Amino acid sequence: MRSTMRAELRFTLNGAAVETMVRPQARLLDVLRDTLGATGTKEGCGEGECGACTVLVDGRAVASCLFPALEAEGKTVLTVEGLRNASGELSVVQRAFVDKGGTQCGFCTPGMVMATTALLQENPSPSDDEIRAGLVGNLCRCTGYVQIVDAVKQAAELAAKERP
Amino acid sequence: MLRLDPFKVERPTTVDEAVALLAAHGAKARVLAGGTDLLPNLKHGLHQPELVVSIGGVAGLRGVKDAGEVLEIGALTTLAELERHPLLAQFAPGLARAAAQVAGPQLRRMGTIGGNLCLDTRCLYYNQSAFWREALGYCLKKDGSVCHVVADGKKCVAAASNDTATMLMALGAEVELRARDGTRRVPLDAFYLPDGAKNTVVDEGELLVCVRVPKGSPARREGYAKLRHRNSIDFPLLSVAVALDVEGVAPGTVTGGLLVVSALQARPLRVSLDAVRGRALDDGAIEELGRLAHGRCHPMTNIADDPAWRRDMVPVLVRRAVADALHA
Ligand SMILES: Cc1cc2nc3c(=O)[nH]c(=O)nc-3n(C[C@H](O)[C@H](O)[C@H](O)COP(=O)(O)OP(=O)(O)OC[C@H]3O[C@@H](n4cnc5c(N)ncnc54)[C@H](O)[C@@H]3O)c2cc1C
Ligand code: SF4
Ligand code: FES
Ligand code: FES
C-alpha cells in the first residue's frame, strides 16, 4: 500500500530549526536518516532491543526506532552529529571512546555515545555499577563492554577537569 | 528491514477529544502512548489501524498525585518517572521496583504505565513477522484457526507479560476508564480476562486515564521477582509479586495480603495467602507459599523456554519476592 499523505513536522535538530513533511507513520529514525540525511544514528534491530538508534529528545535518551516522528513536534533532538562543539572538536564522550578503544566495528557507538552523554548529564560521576545500569539498553557485539565502561569513566573525569 | 504500513495520526490535546476520536473510529482506531509495544506489533502486521490516536499531548494524564487513601497515577506517567518517584518510594515501593525492571532505560523513558497495563499478550507464535507467521499458517489470535501452544485449543493462551500489572494486582489497584458517555472504575482483578486475544475489559472507545493504588498500612511489605536471561531488555519468563501485611517483631505474623504470578497465560494468577494467615513468616511459611504457587502454576510453550524449568522456578521466585518485600 502506498500513501502520499504527508504531515508537517517542526523540531530543533542539533541546534538548528528543521521544518519538513513526513509520512504520518514515519519514525524519528526514518526522518533523521532518510529525510534529513543524518545517518550517524544507526538502525540495529528496529525493535527497541539494541539501543543503536539512541538519540536525545529534550535531553532524554530514547530509542528513535520506536519514536513516532510526529511526537518530536516542537521538541529538541540531539544526535551524534550534534556533539562537536562550535570549533569542531569532538565532545569529551567522543574523545574518551576513541582514547579507550570503546569502539570496534562502530555500529553501536553512536548509540553508546548518546546514552553516555545523557547518563553523564544526569550523573556526572557514576560508579561502575551506575555506568552499567545506565547502558544496559545498549548492546555491543564486539567489545565485551570493558573498554566502553573505561571510556565512560574517562569521559566523566575529562568532563570534571574541563568544567569551569 | 520491517516497515510500518500507512496510517493516519490524530494528536488530541484533551481527554474529551481523545475519546471522541476513539468513539468515532471504533475498531479502526488504536491508542498510541509511548509506542514501545504498539510500534513493534504494527511492524509485525499484528494490527492494521487506519487511525492512530496519539495521546502523548493530552493534558492531565501525567504524574502521580496523593489522593488521600490512594495514589492516583496518570496513564501517561512513564515507567522511568515511577522508578524514582518519591510518592512511590513512600507508599508503593514494590511498584517502583517492578517498573524499574521493564525493558531497558531508553524504553522506560518512553513507555507509560497505561501502555504497560494494556500491553498486548505475548506468544512465541504471535510476536513474529507476518512472513514468519504465514509460514506456520498463522494462529487463532491473528489470521489463523489453530493454536500452536494448546493442541485443539479454542482459546488463545498468550501470556500477560507486563511487569507492573503483576505488582498492581497484588496491591489491589484499580484503573479508571473513560469513554464518551462516562467513566468507570475497574479493579485490576476484574480488568484482565482469560483470553489472550483480548485480555482486558477495555472496550472500543475507552481510554485508560489513571491507576489508583491503595496506599496500604505501615504493615504492608511489597516484593517483586522476575525471571529472565538478561537483567535488562527481556520480558518476564515468569513474574511474582507479593503484598504482605506483616505485624509484630521479625519474622512477624502474616495478617493479610496477596501473591500474584504472571507470564503464564492471558491473566495474572492470584494465589491467596490464607494458608499462612496468622502464622509467623518464617522459612516454613515461605516454603509453603512456594509449594502452593507451584501447584497452581502451569507454564506453557507460549514462551520460548522450557515450561518444566519455569515451573520449577516458581517456588524460587516466590522466595525471592518475599525476600525483596522483607529486605528491600
Ligand atoms: C525490547 C522490548 C523489551 C520490553 N520489555 C518489557 C518488559 O520487560 N516488561 C514489560 O512489562 N514490558 C516490556 N516491553 C513492552 C513495553 O515497552 C512496555 O510494556 C511499555 O510500558 C508499554 O507502554 P507504551 O506507553 O509504550 O505503550 P504503547 O505501545 O503506546 O501501547 C501499548 C498498548 O496499549 C494501548 N494503550 C496505551 N495506552 C493506553 C491508554 N491510556 N488507554 C487505552 N489503551 C492504551 C495501545 O493501544 C497498545 O495496544 C518491552 C518492549 C520492547 C520493545
Ligand atoms: S497461544 Fe495459541 S492462539 Fe494464542 S498467540 Fe500463541 S499460538 Fe496463537
Ligand atoms: S534500532 Fe532501535 S533499539 Fe535497535
Ligand atoms: S563496536 Fe561493534 S557492535 Fe559495538
Image (cartoon, rainbow, N blue to C red):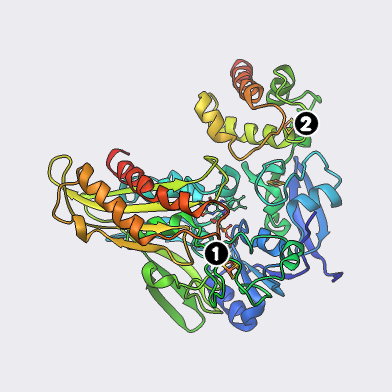
Q: Residue at x 35, y 55 (%)?
A: B294
Quadrant position of the N terminus of chain A in the picture? bottom right
Q: Which residue lies at the image location 61% right of the left edge and 35% below the top edge?
A: A118
Q: Nearer the viewer, residue B96 or A147?
A: A147
As measured in the structure, the alpha-carbon distance from the residue carrying label 1 to the one carrying label 2 is: 35 Å
Q: The residue tagged with tag 1: helix, strand or loop?
A: loop
Image spot of residue B290 (x, y percent): 31, 51
Q: Quadrant of ligand 2?
A: bottom right
Vertical position of residue B237 compared to residue B140: above or below = above
Q: Residue B73 is drawn in which quadrant?
A: bottom left
Ligand 2 within 8 Å, label 1 CB = yes
Q: Residues within 10 Å of mark 2 (few under 14, many from 20)?
A: some
Badge 1 density bin: few <14, some 14–19, many ≥20, Cα 10 Å: many
Relative horizontal placement of residue A66, taking residue B191 as reference (left or right):
right
Residue shown at 43% from the left, 78% from the top: B183
Residue at mark 1: B121
At label 2, the amino acid type is Gly
Task: Check the picture and name the quadrant holding the C terminus of chain A.
Answer: top right
The answer to whether residue B87 is seen in the rendering is no
Q: Circle 2 marks a residue in which chain?
A: A
Front residue of B222/A87: it is B222
**Residue B18 image-quadrant placement:** bottom right
Looking at this view, is A108 or A9 the one in front?
A108
Question: B162 left or right of B225?
Answer: right
Q: Which mark is nearer the camera, 1 or 2?
A: 1
Instruction: Find disc 2 in the rendering and name its residue.
Output: A106
Q: Chain of mark 1?
A: B
| x and y percentages locating residue A105 in the rendered image | 79, 30
Q: Are marks 1 and 2 in contact (CB under 8 Å)?
A: no
Q: Is mark 2 within 8 Å of ligand 4?
A: yes
Residue B123 visible to an observer of this rendering: yes
